[in-house]
Amino acid sequence: MTAILGWGRYPIVDTEMIRPRTMDAAQRATVRGDQTVARGNGRAYGDAAIGGRQTISMTHLNRLRSFDAEKGVVTVESGLLLSDIIDTFLPRGLFPYVVPGTSLITVGGAIAADVHGKNHHQEGGFGEYVESIVLAVPTGETIRASRDEHPDLFHATIGGMGLTGTILEAAIRLRPVETGWIRQRTIVAKDLAAAFSAFESSDSVTYSVAWIDCLARGAQLGRSLIFLGEHARSAELHGNALANRFPVGRTPLSVPINAPAFALNHWTVAAFNELYFRAGARKAASPVLVPAHPYFFPLDAVGNWNRIYGRRGFIQHQSVIPTQNAQGTLAEMLGRIAKRGGSSFLAVLKKLGAGSGIISFPVPGYTLALDFPMRGDLFSFLDELDELVIAAGGRLYLAKDARQSRTTFEAGYPDLSRFREIRRSTDPAGKIKSRLSERIGI
Amino acid sequence: MAVAQQTVLILGGTSDIARATALVFARHDWVVRLAGRTLSELQREADDISARTSRKVTVHAFDVLNTSSFVEFADTLPELPDLVISVVGLLGEQSRSEVDTEHAKEIIRSNYEGPALILSLFAERFVARGHGAIIGISSVAGDRGRGSNYFYGSAKAGFSAFLSGLRNRLAISSNIHVMTVKPGFVRTKMTEDMKLPPLLTAAPAEVGEAVFKALGRRKDVIYVRSIWWLVMLIIRLMPERIFKRLKL
């Protein structure tokens, strides 16, 4: 038995770890599964990649299978890290169409969570760029699925949290880029209304994301920095960037131990936020060139940053609120968070489009991601936030979740019955089960 | 002027160290030939390296325990390579080797007999041709026998002694270079279930880089992480009457 945990360091669960080194071994582990689920690099925050009894770690299956230079399609084993794809292909002028806030996730995990990036409002999620997958299902077959072959299974697997089977292989389309630089522009929004209008007027920009100061209250509630970005073209490079068209990622630092519980409190976070906001506002005037790596993955430079929240871990609460209700509901949520004063270190706001899979998280609207260090009354407070989300027709992101109730989940995901039906056809005996699927009854 | 691409033959081509080493050579424009027991597993590595580097990688069936096949194996390669690297090795299970003669024999043959015989064969062909280089991946376990892995360790000791003898002979009579690599702990499938000290433990990619760099500098014996030199110095110098009581 091995104690495993998600990125939020809660919960910690003992399961039997299976570490296949070949496709055949991964396929057998799926067919013989006893309450099992595939796990990638362990960056889901809660219990999505923790099996009921067994967990299949896919990280050894990290080979490229083939690369079609003409189409820009790379076929990979599902345990390959996105960072590996970027290191290999960015110097050759290709970049994934969709990257989340960390590159340290596997391709299989990216598909299972249908991860989104800063361009979701424009270009959709990771699933949009998956050409095909090879899936091992518990009934014993190995199925190739795409938009043409087994389309139902394909759309159930994208965003399906690993519950339709074990993704063995995937073909991913990459984006041609002229440089490894991003042209970034910052907008300062003095309150939530200003942030919303900044998003609405930046709809045609490829990348956009807002950092919200959760401690700002009253008239300043929702004050934000909105970061806009485009891939820089060769002709747009200047200065140092000219000599270094494809800059490489930085060597990671690391948080070696869990920070003591008192390291993050109202005062340290407030001070940090104030400094961050002022620094951002100073830079807002002119666009800057930023290497892709720090632009997309600022926290990858600090290994194990999750330990900053201490031994007890943290919960990330990420919801999406449909556009028509977004501003009102988010104002209410931010108001309650500010009133509670509970150190949400990171608060990120982002506009989303429609999702690619049957139970993919994204719906057209606004998503808010909040980190909360674990403490006594946290769960009841988060239940309050959930009520606001559900009342507004929203839902929570399963890759971040460690605690939502079954009722919240079912209210948020109305297409669940279709998903369950497809799942029953590939896993009639119920061999695949994660702690997440058990907890919320997927 | 076009320079002919150099060719490296990697024996034991499906190990994590072989994979990492092959990738480094392919990135530096070498033609890579992977040899090992299971062609389908070799092909998986070859496809990976080809997709990453757009370089040619071929696969060749090779069984280190089947010593009578060695001549034919070398004869049927597309060419006599410029460099041969043996990454072949079998840790085995110490406790089983204590009671199971066949298992002990397999450990000895996989780590000493096979690698020494095949490298010796290539050495003679390199001498006849007039150039070539040989790299053997041995182990710090060969520096002093320990209770926890002495069949493995003694076979690696034999392999290290073979390499140093070969190096000695060829350094005097030819310009064929022989290098011994002692990786120390490496995070591989061989060590997957062990708890290893981070400071002493290298990633396979580190081994690949170290091998490539050391070859360029014509090093004789390298530890991948230099701290191992100190660790092994202390281990070698310890008096036997103390050493024998340590649980190592």
Image (spheres, coloured by chain):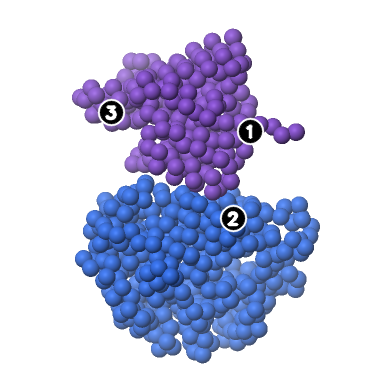
Chain colours: A blue, B purple
Image spot of residue A295 (x, y percent): 62, 63
The amino acid sitting under disc 2 is Ala
The image shows residue A18, relative to residue B127, as above or below, that is below
Q: Is residue A186 visible?
A: yes
Q: Which residue is mark 1?
A: B5
* Of pointers 1 and 3, the one earlier in the residue sequence: 1
Q: Which residue was labeled with disc 3? A: B94
Labels 1 & 3 near each other (Cβ < 8 A): no
Q: Amino acid at mark 1?
A: Gln
Q: Chain of mark 2?
A: A
Q: Amino acid at mark 3?
A: Gln
Q: Residue at x 43, y 70 (%)?
A: A148
Picture quarter containing residue B41? top left
**Res A350 quadrant in image:** bottom right
Relative vertical location of residue A401 with respect to residue B92 in this rendering, above or below = below
Where is residue A138? Give x, y as percent. 27, 61
Q: Residue at x 48, y 23 (%)?
A: B75
- Residue B122 appears left or right of B239: right
Which class describes the residues within 10 Å of circle 2: few (<14), some (14-19), or many (20+)?
few
Tell me the quadrant of the picture where the C terminus of chain A can be found: bottom left
Residue sitting at x 58%, y 46%: B54
On screen, residue A24 versus residue A288, left or right, reads left
- Is A157 above or below relative to B201? below
Residue A308 at least partly seen: no
Task: Give percent across and percent down for residue A358.
Answer: 39, 76
Query: Is residue B242 shown left or right of residue A67?
Result: left
| Of labels 2 and 3, the one closer to you | 2
Q: Is residue B4 above or below residue B172?
A: below
Rendered residue at 30%/25% (across/down) = B106
Residue A51 drawn at (x, y percent): 30, 60
Q: Secondary structure at mark 2?
A: loop
Give the residue number, with chain letter if any, for mark 2.
A69
